Image (tube, rainbow, N blue to C red):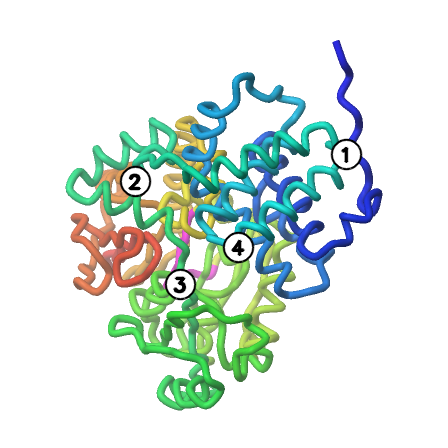
Amino acid sequence: MTTPRPAKPAGAYTAHTAPGVPTRVLAARVLAQVIGRGRSLKAELATALPTLDDSRDRALLEALCFAVLRRRAAYDAALAQWMPRPLSVREDELRALLLVGFAQLDALELPAHAALSATVDAARAMGRDRQAGMVNALLRRAQREGIPPLPARDAFPLWMAEKIEQDWPDEAEAVFSASLQAAPLWLRVNRQHSSRDAMLQQLEAAGIAAEASSVGADAIRLPVPVAVSALPGFADGALSVQDLSAQQVADALAPRPGSRVLDACAAPGGKAAHLLERDPTLQLSALDIDARRLKRISDTFARTGVGQNAKVLAGDAAAPASWWDGQLFDTILLDAPCSATGIIRRQPDVLVHRRPTDIEALIALQARLLDACWSMLTPGGTLLYATCSILRDENQFQVEAFLQRTRDAGFLPLGDAYGHDSWAGRQRLPGEDGADGFFYARLLKKG
């Protein structure tokens, strides 16, 4: 039995310095960690992206990783069909590199010559000289024949696909398709800096195509995404990147001026900042259970120029006794931990990592958070329960169960701008209005 040769370090080959080779090596290594070792795509990219100096290489790295994870089922099927003997589990980086090669030719439609050359050189740069010919042959076949098509449903774990079909039988195919598409870039205008109309004029002057949303008062959509560094006013906090669905949280919550507000799961702070941009008089507490993420909230407040009077707290919203001072809140935002099935287009590793047992644990956690937050809400106050899930167990059924066990709880209806009627709440599905999948339920504590 032959022991695989260890991968050579970066720079071991002259080819490694050729344009595009380091990016493909990094993409293969990131994907091997995500697919083979259960690592978070966001965490792996956070480590890998700073190692690339050119913004174009960083953009390509992200595009390759997202494309592979969205089309992984089709690429795996092509490998199974075209390879007489499957790669061993120890060849996870080589397998990932092949998927990267397929993505260049298929999803990204890069020039074939450059894609093949750089990917074969990347195999050599990874210490896979003996497999470079195989990589070349497989990519040339993909170039000639194309990747055999698979239904969008097949990209989803079977249990998840069946659950989506059960919950949304008429919309399931659209959900599958939209979840595998690249998400548009949505911007939020900071009212403390500018109006939306004025910002649209600035974007036009900068040569950036932009359009206002018809359902989000502060939302601007860019049909062609650009780097945030190119956005006028971004560095000064005049604009933030935030999906339309997340922006509508502020519309649904609509706290009264000067009221006490709790954002119970606040990191990274975008929704809290939006509330403060609209009304700096709010007495807002931004809470998160992960103390390491509090800096992101503070950084968000600092860039947008809000939060001077806000509190940033470390604590578990499900256990108020450890941090709460006992003073009731007028309004509470509970953007609860969830399956993230509504944002697969932004977090495609959900297709890799999510398990049915995760849903059971999340449902139990959401129920604890709802009960605990309710105890901190003043009579007559409102709580907005929100998730980026599209599963009824986490959304409609979760709220139904809460209302059944909570005597002083009712709900305030939301309009069609928030998506499909889902009894006490509203559900937007992925891609509708160009936005992420999101659930909203506005709950009233009876006085």
Tell whether 321 sits left or right of 144. Answer: right
Helix, strand or loop status at disc 2? loop
Residue that appears at 62% across and 21% down: 89
How far separated are the C-alphas under marks 1 and 2? 44 Å
Of callouts 1 and 2, which one flags the residue occurring earlier in the amino acid sequence? 1
Residue that appears at 33% across and 77% down: 211
Residue that appears at 55% across and 47% down: 65
Identity of the residue furthest to the right in this view? 12
Is 122 magenta? The answer is: no
Residue 184: mark in rendering: 3
Residue 127: mark in rendering: 1
| Residue 354 visible in the current orientation | yes
Q: Quadrant of the N terminus?
A: top right
226 and 428: which is toward the camera: 226
Q: Amino acid at mark 2?
A: Leu
Q: Residue 218's spot in the image, x, y percent?
A: 36, 77
How far separated are the C-alphas under marks 4 and 3? 24 Å
Is 332 magenta? The answer is: yes
Q: Amino acid at mark 1?
A: Gly
Of callouts 3 and 2, which one flags the residue occurring earlier in the amino acid sequence? 3
| Residue 279 visible in the current orientation | no
List the residue tagged with mark 4.
111
Given this view, does label 4 or label 2 mark the residue nearer the observer?
Answer: 4
Which residues are the magenta region?
327-336
Cβ–Cβ under 8 Å for marks 1 and 4: no
| Image quadrant assignment for residue 210 | bottom left
